[in-house]
Amino acid sequence: MRGTNAAQPRCVALQGTLGVAAHCGIYARRPSVCREVEPSWEFGRISPQCDKARLAHGLPVLTPQDWLEPYDTDEPPLPQAA
C-alpha cells in the first residue's frame, strides 16, 4: 500500500499503465487491505471502494458485463450474493 497516501495515489506494487494494461506485481502476497477490496461485480455485487478508486483515476466503474466472456454477452449477470 506504500504510495497510496500521496496526493496522486499509486501503489508501488502496481505495474503497467492504468486504463491500458495494469496489474498487481505482488498479487499472491498482497496485504490484507488489498484482499478486502473486491472489484465491483466480481462476486455479483457492487464494491463502493472499487468504484471510488476507479473514478479517482478517470476509469469507468465496472459493470456486470465486464465479467462476462465475449461469447457470453446474452447471459445474465452474476447473481447477487446473499
Image (spheres, rainbow, N blue to C red):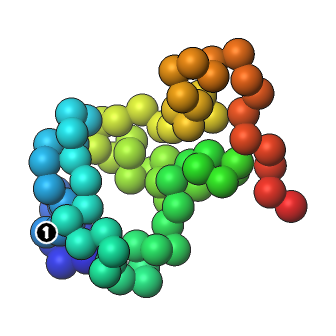
Residue visible at 14% across and 56% down in the picture: 15
User: Is residue 9 among what the camera can see?
Assistant: no
Q: Is residue 47 above or below residue 55?
A: below
The N terminus: image quadrant: bottom left
Please state if 59 lies on the left or on the right of 61 as rendered: left
Please state if 42 lies on the left or on the right of 30 as rendered: right
Could you tell me residue 21's position as x and y percent? 21, 39
The C terminus: image quadrant: bottom right
Mark 1 surroundings: few (<14), some (14-19) or many (≥20) residues within 10 A: few
Residue visible at 53% across and 61% down in the picture: 38
Could you tell me residue 25's position as x and y percent? 19, 65
Please state if 35 lies on the left or on the right of 26 as rendered: right
Could you tell me residue 63's position as x and y percent? 58, 34
Could you tell me residue 26's position as x and y percent? 24, 72
Name which quarter of the figure residue 5 lies in.
Answer: bottom left
| Residue located beneath label 1 in the image | 12
Q: Is residue 16 above or below residue 70?
A: below
Residue visible at 51% across and 38% down in the picture: 62
Name which quarter of the figure residue 24 lies in.
Answer: bottom left
User: Is residue 2 among what the camera can see?
Assistant: yes
61 or 17: which is nearer to us?
Answer: 17
Please state if 75 lies on the left or on the right of 59 as rendered: right
Residue visible at 13% across and 48% down in the picture: 16
Q: Amino acid at mark 1?
A: Val
In the structure shown, which secondary structural element does the residue marked by tag 1 occupy? loop
